[in-house]
Image: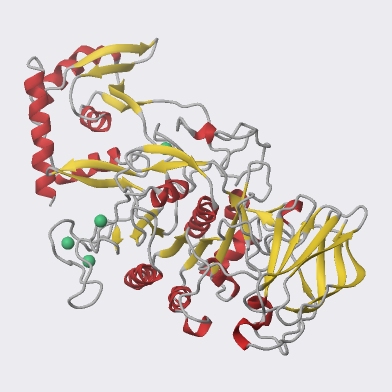
Amino acid sequence: MKLRILSISFLMASLTACQNANIPSTSLPNSAEQVERIQKAKIDPAKKYFDGQVNVTLSDPAQLNDFVARTFAESGLALRLLDKVSGRPIYLFEYQSEKIPEEVSRLVLEDSSVLRASPNYEIQVEGFNDPDFSKQWSMKNTGQEAPRSLAGRRGSDARLPENDYEPKVEVVVAIVDTGIDYFHEDLSVTEVIGGRVDVVGGNVWKNPDEIADNGLNDDNNGGEGIGYVDDVYGYDFVGKNGSPTDDHGHGTHVAGVIGALRNNFKGIVGINKSVKMMGIRFLGATGGGSYFGAVQGISYVIDMKKRFPEKKFLMNCSWGGTSRFGENEDNDFLMAAFQEAADNDILTIAAAGNSSMSTRYNNFFPANYAKDIPEFISVAATNNIDQIADFSNYGSDSVQIAAPGVLILSTLPSNKYEAWSGTSMAAPQVAGAAALVWSMNPKMTALDVKRALLGSVDIIPQLQGYVSSKGRLNIKRAVEGDMNVFPAVEPIVEIVAQKSKSPQITGSQRLDHVTEFQVEGAKDIAVCFDNLKLDDSSDWVQIYGSDYRVRDIITGTRVSKGLRSGKIKNLCSAPVPGDRIFVRLYSSSPFAAGGGGIGPRRGFETESLKVTK
Ligand SMILES: [Ca+2]
Ligand SMILES: [Ca+2]
Ligand SMILES: [Ca+2]
Ligand SMILES: [Ca+2]
């Protein structure tokens, strides 16, 4: 393997010599160690220097001409003096060669007259040199306009720390999605080796035990006869091959948020300086896929975790649907897969969904597994003034945290960039933060990482009732362990007795009835039911405020689960902002359709209003 790289490096050097006939070809030995050093130097995207320049300090200024002559005679390197520091033997040379400045520095250091030698590094003003960082309001909100949107509010962002945290342990983030463009200029560092593109650095996962493109399952993973052949960057469960490339864009967008390369003079800034992103492709070119494919992907990740127990594993799941994989939680294969991941200390971060509904009573999977699996986080989306995004699902017990998810600029296949919106874009902010926290705290469990994230949120009043942590992700505080001592300054909550009854629905009656409540001076109001009876298929209770935006939907399916005699006590709706709340009881179709007779009475009785002032 190393020999192959050697011969190519050598070939490149010879070509250069031919192009520049006046520069003699190098006689420098290309030791394996040297090649490795060059590779290492090249793969650090944070280092940017002036090509073809080197700083040299000599022990004696009188040595200058002899030094230049010796260098040319011994290594064929023609140095030309560009500049010097007056009164000191410190020189800036330029040279013509394919050699990188690190290599030239090491070479001239061997001369006895040289005290110091180094590449001429560029100095940058503070902050990131990535050209589009200023458009990433989600990372640093300066009040700039989000692309195609209104001006934001300073600080309403995920609070990206600008420190380059060096990981203490390797964290693998499996992006269970449409694949990843793992050759993207802002995700990995690539080189052409032996006529094919290879990843030599950056934030893309490479399976160390698998040899690419040899048609063999070198690490023998995936069981006998059905193993994963050439799975270097993850696996493609749609195409059933080892190249999870992305022909949709979604997975690559997610990847950019978590680990776009920082300070590489390209594109955007990811949350992690160093992370390994594994492509698990189970969604095809149209963005569609099956839960079965998801289970295959999750099982692959669990198997990899078992092979590399010292590494930390996370999964980002920016997808979902309203159906369970099985009829109930006992027969839900998808939930069982996530539970097995949790049992193996894998933390899953999922998008809460984009249906503007409360997932407290409505299904949305996998996000709602957060209700049952502790090592699982459901993420809602906020906009650039820290409001819940108008498309975002929410739930005071079903969704744990909010993160920026409106017009998020990130990577797309073929070195492109675009701003997309969705809880899909919010989840990777939390996944990226989780990777960063875990990389700095190797002793943490998946559950510890989740606690660190939820405990360090910025408490946002307008997120009360929408996410259980009551706040928006703060990456800087999470990685610094700056936890909220008190959960929040609790708002004044008043319980206002409010007895009222809806009309009773009986038999095959149709009904559409709205009950309105008002409490002067209220910031938000939730309605609490004493008695709620609804039919599984045809009855709905919608909760909305004076903006007519539905904040909660309660259906018979939800309230009848686990209840005796279909009656529920102390069920409160999601809160509605403002001083008015509307409860709409809606019965769409005859109750008797299935039973053929007169059913029990349905409707609601309210007990109280929960009012925040
Ligand atoms: Ca394999
Ligand atoms: Ca192979
Ligand atoms: Ca493929
Ligand atoms: Ca970048």
Classify residue 407 by image quadrant.
top right
User: Going by the image, does 283 lie left or right of 258?
Assistant: left
What coloring was used for the rendering?
secondary structure
Residue at the spot x=20%, y=74% of the render?
Answer: 226
User: Which is more toward the observer, 124 or 555?
Assistant: 555
Residue 182 in view, yes or no: yes
Residue 24 in view, yes or no: no
Position of the C terminus, as image quadrant, is bottom right
User: Going by the image, does 176 lie left or right of 190?
Assistant: right
Q: Position of residue 82 (x, y in %)?
A: 30, 12
Q: Position of residue 306 (x, y in %)?
A: 35, 73
Classify residue 313 by image quadrant.
bottom left
User: Which is more toward the observer, 583 or 192?
Assistant: 583
User: Which is more toward the observer, 182 or 236?
Assistant: 236
Task: Please tell me whether residue 56 is drawn above or below residue 438 in the rendered image.
Answer: above
Q: Where is residue 437 in the image (x, y as percent from the top left)?
A: 53, 57
Q: Residue lying furthest top in this view?
A: 86
Task: Please tell me whether residue 469 is drawn above or below residue 416 in the rendered image.
Answer: below
